[in-house]
Image (cartoon, rainbow, N blue to C red):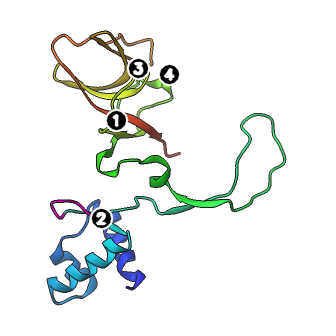
Amino acid sequence: MKSEHSDKLIKFYKRHKRMPGYREMMELFGFRSKNAVFKLINKLVERGIITKDGEGRLSPTRLFGEIKVLGTVEAGFPSAAEEELQDTMTLDEWLINNKEATYMLKVKGDSMIDAGIIEGDMVLVDRSKTPKNGDIVIAEVDGGWTMKYFRKTGNKVELIPANKKYNTIIPREDMRVAAVVISVIRKY
């Protein structure tokens, strides 16, 4: 299989923020039949370039591609360092354990600023994780959505902000944790 097929697929995905449908793939690859697209999809799945869920929906296996790991950097006192290729990895490999349960949200507001999360950041969240005390969670509380620290004592659940300007949230009626934050991504 030509790498140009996967390159075209990646370009389409980056431009449209979705995978193309069969008809769009026919145009993209210059195929005359949906059968040719079907065969290509199976090859791409076999090679791990894309995945297909139980309902036949396609998604890329890697959001960012491989990046070189060149070593470590001192965050304390400066020390001598040499650049040496140690490995390569994808950000997906490093950050995501359960791809089907993982998604990103854009942060709005400043209630988690003391946790180092600011407006405009992207948070990577996993909806399959069970929240533990101290986790940052995405929760629906009394009909509204928020991101806060999770704390449970007995049957009492509290959502705690990381900004002294905000009060702790104690659900009046209902609360549902939708996901646990697993990473914060900030683009400079």
**Upstream in sequence: badge 2 or badge 3:** 2
Quarter of the image with the N terminus is bottom left
Q: Which residues are magenta?
A: 51-56
- What is the CA distance from the residue labelled 1 to the residue labelled 3? 13 Å
- What is the CA distance from the residue labelled 2 to the residue labelled 3? 34 Å
| Secondary structure mainly formed by the magenta segment | loop
Residue 53 is a magenta residue: yes
Tell me what residue is drawn at x 22 percent, y 78 percent: 25
Kind of residue indicated by mark 3: Asn
Which circle marks residue 133 in the picture?
3
Q: Residue furthest bottom?
A: 32
**Upstream in sequence: badge 1 or badge 4:** 4
**Upstream in sequence: badge 3 or badge 4:** 4
Tell me what residue is drawn at x 16 percent, y 23 percent: 143
Which circle marks residue 129 in the picture?
1
The location of residue 64, given as percent across then percent down, is: 45, 59
Q: Secondary structure at mark 2?
A: strand
Depth check: give the residue in front, 102 or 78. Answer: 102
- What is the CA distance from the residue labelled 2 to the residue labelled 4? 38 Å
- What is the CA distance from the residue labelled 1 to the residue labelled 4? 23 Å
Residue with the mark numbered 2:
51
Residue with the mark numbered 4:
114
Q: Residues within 10 Å of mark 4 (few under 14, many from 20)?
A: few
Q: Secondary structure at mark 1?
A: loop
Tell me what residue is drawn at x 36 percent, y 39 percent: 125
Q: Secondary structure at mark 3?
A: loop
Would you place residue 112 above or below residue 53 in this image? above
